[in-house]
Image: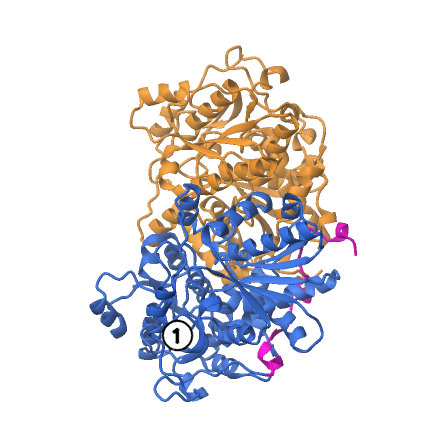
Chain colours: A orange, B blue
Amino acid sequence: MSNKEIPYKIYLEENEMPDSWYNVRADMKKKPAPLLNPATLEPLKAEELEPIFCKELVKQELNETDAYIPIPQEIKDFYKMYRPSPLVRAYCLEKKLGTPAKIYYKFEGNNTSGSHKLNSAIAQAYYAKQQGLKGVTTETGAGQWGTALSMACAYFDLDCKVYMVKVSYEQKPFRREVMRTYGASVTPSPSTTTEVGKKILEEHPGTTGSLGCAISEAVETATKHEGYRYVLGSVLNQVLLHQSVIGLESKIAMDKYGIKPDIIIGCAGGGSNLGGLISPFMGEKLRGEADYHFIAVEPASCPSLTRGKYVYDFCDTGKVCPMAKMYTLGSGFIPSANHAGGLRYHGMSSIVSELYDQGLIEARSVEQTSVFEAAEQFARVEGILPAPESSHAIRVAIDEALKCKETGEEKTILFGLTGTGYFDMVAYEKYNNGEMSDYIPTDKDLEAGFAGLPKQPE
Amino acid sequence: MSNKEIPYKIYLEENEMPDSWYNVRADMKKKPAPLLNPATLEPLKAEELEPIFCKELVKQELNETDAYIPIPQEIKDFYKMYRPSPLVRAYCLEKKLGTPAKIYYKFEGNNTSGSHKLNSAIAQAYYAKQQGLKGVTTETGAGQWGTALSMACAYFDLDCKVYMVKVSYEQKPFRREVMRTYGASVTPSPSTTTEVGKKILEEHPGTTGSLGCAISEAVETATKHEGYRYVLGSVLNQVLLHQSVIGLESKIAMDKYGIKPDIIIGCAGGGSNLGGLISPFMGEKLRGEADYHFIAVEPASCPSLTRGKYVYDFCDTGKVCPMAKMYTLGSGFIPSANHAGGLRYHGMSSIVSELYDQGLIEARSVEQTSVFEAAEQFARVEGILPAPESSHAIRVAIDEALKCKETGEEKTILFGLTGTGYFDMVAYEKYNNGEMSDYIPTDKDLEAGFAGLPKQPE
């Protein structure tokens, strides 16, 4: 099929949308390492997880065998409000770069949460509702996940308690107001509403918070309140499962037009977008049916894949969560203060970590000024102001397209455009004013994080 | 065709998108009144308008006879990046309201400018580029138009000078940064860069600016700089022409599914969205082929249609622009300080004014707390956080749907959802905190505005 016949945007029809999520673990010979009980260092059983997570989500978390898990009708109906997301052919970017490469991106920003996070938020809210719960608790950093969850909870009439990293709560009042408009209660973290929050405030009186700390508070609140469970927007297997809808839609759209990507690129913080985007393609690779070059892009200032260790670590600062095996910088690691965007979690999803460890994914780290350069270039020709997180993928997509320009190769590049940057204008302002700087952690910086790693299981 | 077969979102294929804009004036027996030279009170000729506006746009401004004006290929290509916009069936809102009415909305917010304004911005930038100009100047209030124009200028590599109403410049730094990211220069108005700005600053030292004043500055700058022209985001005939793409796409989508709207609702500030949305339907009505109930919704605090006078008035504070016949509150009218959203222009497009004067459109004014109530209700079930402007239309759409609930009528309602509220969180915060108030201008308030009306032509 010639280029001419491929539209700028490919939208699937409703009846072409996926009916099931795809569980990549089913096709992995070596499975990701299980979650451990931090006290016993033994793999956690369903009944140990159920006080924290919804029952059905625990099942999904532990399910390593079913490749396809049907999407309940209620979730499919919600998906129809903002999905299918468009698969866009970046004709204007290609022209601007003068590259023979064909660039596609799956754009997940056309919803009020502004990102792909809604794909899992609605699923988690649905199962909480099904279980007859009153509400859910969570943490949010930049606010995309909190917004997504607020929207999902409003739809199912569930209470939603969000712990927002204090620095974001103060610097991003607009995100906070979006959540409040959807009826969520938003508490700056660390707070005095939890024991772990109080303890952290005592030890670090001036702290502006961290994601790891907000997680601890949200978990504590969920376990202490009757009828509440904790939900998480990334890292977990269940989240990557729900996010597979990104990759599935992409693949259906590409198959429809006979397009086969050579390179698939995603930004990687906790791994939810990357894992979701690549999963059906990775499935083909694992089954030996096709080959793709996968690239995970992370910030040089928070380089869990490229410079982290593949070990068991705490998922949160308060160490109240299960332990996960992952590429990690240590649960105490916090990116330097000049780090502007998200992608600041110290670890990486167990699935992505294991796939990376098996050599199935390449990882690259990029510096933030070059990321914003790519963001601006993209915005000006493609008309979408991207989220700083998504712009990590744009950076590498442009780099790869420019390589094609040099070599003359007509590679097909697919990247995930996870969201929009409308609530990130403070960072853009810094960039516009020439005040943005880069920081690559020294080995010594990293060692401080690694020093906090827990005792490993035998 | 039964409801079941109508998807949540109807997207046209690229080849179904309109090839021409529709010029409703061609089907109006009594045409809108012409623009006048404020000095002579004579209708302006093309050559008098060309120092201000691009040549091709002047032609479009004065064209009363051609019903269809072809959309140039370059503009069609740009449209394909963010259009067709979805026509959404508001299944969830219907269910929530328990109404037998069928509610549809045309959603124009899925682009970085966040509104329909981009439809005309790209056209105006294109014609400026065609004419070999260096750049364009404009004013912006809330910032949607300025953002749209910045995006369009970045695409065609044109310089873009935006005068932003000072109060918005200061209160909406994020909008300003979006414009800067697209390479525009943004100046708070009134400024000392123009004679009219200096004069206004002298007379009103503490002023936070107004749209009318920013228009004057932008016009002065365009006429004083070689290779620049002024462009405007609403009110003008040319803008309503470009915005007809909204209505044309809506009509094609509805025709495809055999849907015929009974009521068509749009918010109305300068009239660009309303005029664009209703135009092809109005054409049918004017030609006697079909009937529709059109409703223009305006803020009670800026009620140009419902309480204004239909006379010739100045379009700007500095009185440097042509005079237009329109429903107006007087060019000196400024909504009370508690007015939160846009839709604050003192006048209304000549086309909409004339159609309204002929009794072809109903006008309603609504108070802002009830508008935000509707906005919140809509956001929670339909998942989109609407712009305050768009929410005026939502308010009346909900009111009409609730009437249907009482009467049992299964009316089909179409409204324009012009944009998203992501940059309006200050207003939402006020609403969330219960601090939003209403103000309906007294007759005395209005008389002050009317006192500034110019001498009318014979």
Per the image, is A352 magenta? no
Crowd rating for badge 1 (residues with CA inside 10 Å; few <14, some 14–19, many 20+): many
Residue situated in front as seen by the camera: A398 or A200? A200
Q: Report in which chain the residue with disc 1 lies.
A: B
Residue situated in front as seen by the camera: B135 or A351? B135
Amino acid type, residue under disc 1 in the picture: Cys
Residue furthest front as drawn: B443
A366 relative position to A48: left or right = left
Q: Is residue A111 above or below residue A180?
A: below
Residue under the point 48% across and 58% down: B113
Residue under the point 59% across and 15% down: A48
Residue situated in front as seen by the camera: B355 or A83? B355
Task: Locate the C terminus of chain A and report the quarter of the image it occupies.
Answer: top right
Task: Locate the N terminus of chain A and report the quarter of the image it occupies.
Answer: bottom right
Q: What is the span of residues highlighted in magenta in the rendered image?
A: B1-29
Instruction: Identify residue for label 1.
Output: B315
Is residue B87 visible in the rendered image? The answer is no
Q: Is residue A134 above or below residue A109?
A: above
Is residue A192 visible in the rendered image? The answer is yes
Residue situated in front as seen by the camera: A68 or B31? B31
Q: Is residue A42 above or below residue B390?
A: above
Per the image, is B4 magenta? yes
Q: Is residue B268 above or below residue B26?
A: above
B187 relative position to B386: left or right = left
Residue under the point 43% across and 61% down: B147
Residue B39 image position (x, y, % from top left): 34, 86
User: Dot 1: what SS?
Assistant: loop
Residue B256 image position (x, y, % from top left): 73, 63
